[in-house]
Amino acid sequence: LVTVTINDKKLQVEEGTSILEAAKSANIYIPTLCHMNLHGGVEHNPGSCRVCVVEIEGRKNLAPSCNTMVAEGMVINTNSIRAITSRRTVVELLLSDHPQDCLLCEKNMHCELQALAADMGIREMKYKGEMSTFPKDFSSASIERNLDKCILCRRCVTACGKIQTVSVLSAVNRGFHTIISPAFGLPMVDTNCTFCGQCVSVCPTGALTQVNNTTKVWEALNHKDKFVIVQTAPAVRAALGECFGDTSGKAVTGKMVAALRAMGFDKVFDTDFAADLTIMEEAAELIDRMNNGGRLPMLTSCCPAWINYFEHEFKDMLDVPSSCKSPQQMFGAIAKNYYAKKMNLNPENMVVVSVMPCLAKKYEASREEMKNDVDIVISTRELAKMIKEAGISFHSLPNEEFDSFLGESTGASVLFGVTGGVMEAALRTAYEWITGEGLENVEFSMIRGLDGIREATVQIKDREVKAAIANGLGNARILLNKIRNGEADYQIIEIMACPGGCINGGGQPYLRGDYEVLKRRAGALYEEDQNKPIRKSHENPAIIKLYEEFLDKPNSEIAHHLLHTQYFY
Ligand code: HC1
Ligand code: SF4
């Protein structure tokens, strides 16, 4: 331990701690624009923005606190007049080369530069000069890039390169002309980008943002001939409340349903219904592969960023993922082909809207081979904006129930939103199908948790099922390389592109480096599972009826036609 004094407060901290972290441990917060602790302990502290400078007694120059380590006896002042003035100048210079259109910006009220300028009370543009202008990249269905707003913090470079190991983004050119860009300035859509949105989640400004589809949803809702239905992904309920000032860890399922109904949706349904359906198809596919010498391990296929990554980087293994479409797409297919028939609706007049925690879901819905399933995808953040825009007082809403029957679901399906949840749901069903016996304890606690890679051997009667789970694409790469090199004998692998799973999707409320929030969001989903009367997908009465009336059995011809897909490169 070393003893340091920060703002007249004496404290002891571990050697090797940065001044920024040491100050934080004493509840002294130093502003930063580039530094951020990223998931899994990956530190991003390039020391490039110079906002976090502090004064150290005996040193001539101010020091960036994010990458200056404490030393025995150091006396630090985080708010000396030199430090404050210098920090302010940095922000004023950044503003001098930043579009002044905060009111019109997708990140308005969520921009860290805007917040800092407000905290500093900056009221005039002190420096005026040349402004950089770059072409905007609106090429993808998921993410927009507006480099005029980039402050070169490089958080996106670290998120994409170190956490996701996709490495689409890097700094090119020099000096005033430096930009963060894909190689050769390619538009995002022509790169290996998976649209996971982890770069958007960490971007402090409006340089990387989601594609906003809220106007399209309002247009559909106001179209008199359209029957507009909505499905909500498992993870949305675990985070939406945070957009309305709730502390994290509280599911707001009932209020979310009430808000969607108040907005004017004709039916409010649940992606969880389709997650149960996915388990029926996926568990059947797994058992078939296990019994009939099929390709093992089988990889889950509900995460579109993961599928995108797989198609780009593991072209030699396209037979490994399950052929199941994701719950989002299965929902759309069932809505337009079964629900429509049952309710006497013309599918052409139906609009299927998805609320997802994910930006890659926007891209998934636009994929050529299944673009008829889902019409519009909005994120958790977009839904929150629409609820506010509609003047709905979220906290005054009653708790309402999803509509029948595409709104009926089990505890298994809500777990999809957290890493390991698809596996747990699949095991609950596979266990009962393989053994023909009831599963007493449905909680597979050995596969829970937020570690990047987890493995477990599950005893199913006389069979050992070896399971592995990866979350975050960098971790997925480690597992996939093991399979490719013949070093793994797993039967089933679950992969989610975002660290923690969908609870940390690119469309969720911003975490700003506080990964403890993920534990609380996960807890909210586990609680919802516990409180459900039915906790196994194959016991969902609406799903049983769907097979009786329409699909016959899992992996039937019609199920294959509507609910399965193929992968491309
Ligand atoms: Fe997900 Fe899924 S769990 S992919 O993370 O399989 O987005 O929540 O909707 O489709 O169900 C996301 C979440 C979501 C699908 C399901
Ligand atoms: Fe990288 Fe994901 Fe951002 Fe694409 S969306 S640039 S893969 S972090």
Image (cartoon, helix red, strand yellow):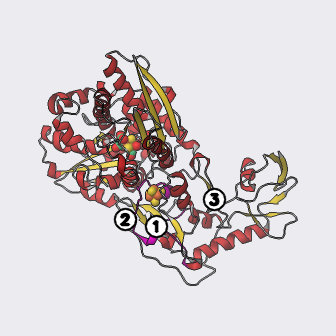
Q: At which x and y percent is residue 531?
A: 42, 26
Q: Percent x, y for residue 562?
A: 20, 42
Q: Could you tell which of marks 3 and 2 lies nearer the N-terminus?
A: 3
Q: Which element type, helix, strand or loop, lies under badge 1?
A: loop
Q: Is mark 1 within 8 Å of ligand 2?
A: yes
Quarter of the image with the C terminus in it:
bottom left
Q: Secondary structure at mark 2?
A: helix
Give the distance between the C-alpha atoms of the residues marked 2 and 1, in whole angstroms. Answer: 9 Å
| Mark 1 Cα-neighbour bin, 10 Å: few <14, some 14–19, many ≥20 | some
| For residue 512, side relative to residue 489 (left or right) | right
Q: Residue at x 58, y 62 (%)?
A: 115
Note whether 476 is above or below 422 in the view shown: below
Front-most of residues 519 and 120: 519
Q: Position of 228 compared to 143: left or right?
A: left
Residues marked 3 and 2 touching at CB (< 8 Å)? no
Magenta part of the protein: which range? 177-206
For the point 17% across and 27% down, which residue is it?
548
Q: Quadrant of residue 36?
A: bottom right
Q: What residue is rendered at 76% in x and 67% in y?
A: 83
**Cβ atoms under marks 2 and 1 closer than 8 Å:** yes
Q: Give the amino acid type for the residue marked by disc 1 in the picture.
A: Pro
Residue topped by disc 3: 35
Residue 194 covered by magenta stretch: yes
Give percent across and percent down for residue 377: 32, 53
Residue that numbered label 1 is attached to: 182
Say above or below: 542 vs 389: above
User: Which amino acid does the dot numbered 3 rest on?
Assistant: His
Distance Cα–Cα, label 3 vs label 2: 29 Å
Q: Which residue is mark 2?
A: 190
